[in-house]
Image (tube, rainbow, N blue to C red):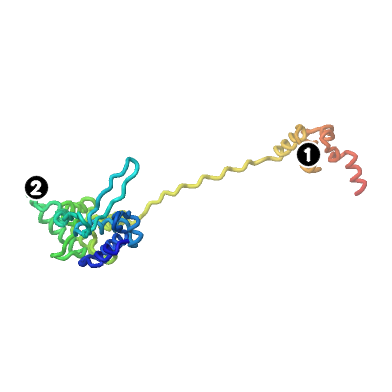
Amino acid sequence: MSYQATNWAMKQRDMKPATKTVLLCLADRHNPENGCFPSHKRIATDACMSERSVRNHLAELEARGLLRRVRGTGGRLKRAATRYVFAFEDGFEAVDKSADRAESRRQKCAESRRQNLPPNPVREPLKEEDAHEAPASNDLFEGVKRAVGFGPNAILPSWWRDRAAREHVMGWKERFGLTDTEIIEIAAATRKEHPIPPDGPKALDRAMERRWRAKQAAKNGNKRRRHYKRPSAAPAKPVFSEYDRLKLRADWVNGDGFLPQSSLTNGDVQRLLQQKLVTPERLRQRGLGYLIPDGPWAARRETAA
């Protein structure tokens, strides 16, 4: 810390508070013998601001002639620190950059003014075939502008200025088959939902399309054809006759697969034997001999009855 640098920094006037804060932080880091070498990160931490703001304030102090930055030349892999030389130090040579800064500001202002100019300020002469269409297009275009809320002396957005906007408005007549009266009426109706004028005529395309669809629906009798896909008929269930049912049970008995004893009833066995689809010996082999009507189990049942 250097008392001389801090005292000199406190006496400086006519600058922003943040700029003077950066100057005081530099003065606080000044060493009378070695100089001042704080980094941008250290200055930003001391001044409670971002490093980008610190760089801007350092450039302002250097332009005012209060300090000079001396870039250090480090090695190949290490960058040397920047030294800040104050105006009160011996051998200080101020670099006046105020003229350069003023010139750069004038150039930026001139470029911004050029960018805000209309893209084509010079009007091109109308062709012979367009000469007859120009009055009608002008009337329709001016009517649409008044309908959306632009006065006669209003400053139009860029999308309403060029010739493409006028051609887009005229294209509604061919695309949607609308008349001039209908177009102006639709444009005026849009102000109920959107009081603020649109940025360009393309914002009205959806409203024009809705009117065209309404006209088409009225032309077709307002009948909407809906093609419903007819559901396919459910597959018919197979119809089994009594003989088919007995044949299925006979296949179970004559087969070698597992056959639960509860799969057949006394009536089923009696009908199978009558149709001669199974034999009593096969029923006994499959463990169903007790279901044979004239078997021992049947005699026992009749005795018990």
- Give the residue at x 9% y 52%: 123
| Quarter of the rendering containing residue 11 | bottom left
> x%, y% of residue 120?
12, 51
- Dot 1: element: helix
Give the mark nearest the N terminus, 1 or 2: 2
Q: Where is residue 148 in the image (x, y as percent from the top left)?
A: 21, 63
Name the residue that disc number 2 marks.
Answer: 129
Q: In which quarter of the image is residue 93?
A: bottom left
Amino acid at circle 1: Arg
- As drawn, the label of residue 284 is none
SS class, disc 2: helix
Q: In this view of the protein, can residue 82 be seen by the observer?
A: yes
Q: Which of 135 and 23 is in front in this view?
A: 23
Near mark 1 (Cα within 10 A), the count class, few <14, some 14-19 or many ≥20, is some
Label 2 neighbour load within 10 Å: few <14, some 14-19, many 20+: few
Kindly indicate whether the residue at mark 2 contacts the one at mark 1 (C-beta within 8 angstroms): no
Q: List the single residue furthest toward the front.
A: 33
Q: Position of residue 157 (x, y in %)?
A: 19, 59
Q: Quadrant of residue 44?
A: bottom left
Task: Find the distance from the CA under tag 1 to the CA under tag 2.
Answer: 101 Å
Q: For the residue marked with disc 2, what is the amino acid?
A: Glu
Q: Quadrant of the N terminus?
A: bottom left
- 94 to the left or right of 211: left
User: How far from the left and from the top, in percent, is residue 201?
Assistant: 22, 56
Instruction: Return the residue nearer the eye: 99 or 33.
Output: 33
Task: Report the number of discs.
Answer: 2
Residue 191 appears in view: no
State left or right for residue 212 relative to residue 274: left
Q: Which of the labelled discs sits on residue 271, or is there none?
A: 1
Above or below, 192 relative to 218: below
